[in-house]
Image: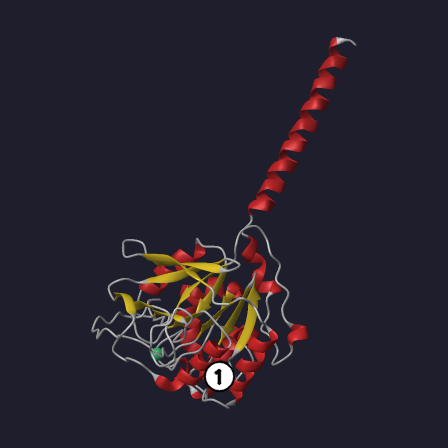
Amino acid sequence: MNLQGRATQFLVAGVVFAGIGVTLRYWDALQAQPSLKKLPTSVKPTPKNDSAASPKLVTGKGDPVLVGAGDIAKCDATEDTLTAQILEEIPGTIFTMGDNVYQRGTAEEFQKCYDPAWGSLKARTFPSPGNHDYYTPNAAPYYAYFGTKAGPAGKGYYSYDLGQWHIVSLNSNIDAYKGSEQERWLRADLAAHPKTCTLAYWHHPVFSSGVHGNDPKMKDIWQTLSDMKADVVVNGHDHHYERFAPQTAEGKADQKGLRQFVVGTGGAELRDRMTPKPNSEVRNAQTFGVIKFTLRPKTYDWEFVPIKGQTFKDKGTGNCTT
Ligand SMILES: [Fe+2]
């Protein structure tokens, strides 16, 4: 082979190797994609009592992550943008614990206050409504803004699966007593999804050391969750972070009970007046941030992640009851 032929051979080999390199990097990049970023298109609210139509999760590498907070967006605050910045760096499904926007949950507030803060995360956000969302009749702008991601309009309760976990978003602004439509839906939904691990979230906490304190309106729901061996409850409404030990609906410590978190730290002003309640393990009302759950097949890790410039953290691991 003459010199020109050999040069051509090297050139061809170089192009092939470069091509393989690009292909591998592209493949690596694909593999490195946060798997749960695919969730918004693969997880849809569960139609009422229709287990056959349950969403099919596209699982990827790693355990699913569920991350979020309640009491979020205010046009005159900047902390909501800072909590959004945390979320932008954490792949996974986002949940909200109500009071998504202040003061009255109007369409204008959703567009001008929520959307610039958490709006870019909407495609992977599964919300729950709070009392401020309901200050506009029937929380109509809330349902219009989140669309099908908020569950059936006017009901606002729905469920989905993340890996081996069943996740339930509930509505503490409507009837939730034993025998109510929502409570009966919950019992049927949990019976249809007998996962080892279940997490439920809504706005008004049954237990809180904060200004609003304990709110019994979801106590029957707590009992139903407990009857069906659920594991974790996450709420907002009081503007602080709090973690309780597992307990019963009556507030008795019980390792087989539900572990509840208050995470009203999404951006609205914090309130540090506290009266510690029994079984309260950790409280902090000086830090904005979000809670991140890593959902393993039989256990879960929780981690409170503060906004940039703040330092409080809380992390640990819990077991699912069986
Ligand atoms: Fe609230």
Nearer to me, 320 or 53? 320
Q: Amino acid at mark 1?
A: Ala
Residue at the extreme top: 2
Is disc 1 placed on a helix, strand or loop? helix
Nearer to me, 67 or 244? 244
Q: Is residue 31 left or right of residue 88?
A: right
Image coords of residue 213 (percent x, y)? 28, 79
Count numbered badges in the picture: 1
Image coords of residue 179 (percent x, y)? 50, 91
Q: Is residue 307 left or right of residue 293?
A: left
The image quadrant of residue 312 is bottom left
Image coords of residue 180 (percent x, y)? 50, 90
Quadrant for the N terminus in the image: top right
Image coords of residue 225 (percent x, y)? 47, 77
Task: Say whether mark 1 is within 8 Å of ligand 1.
Answer: no
Q: Is residue 294 left or right of residue 2?
A: left
Residue carrying label 1: 140
Residue at the extreme bottom: 179
**Residue at x-position 47% and y-position 72%:** 200
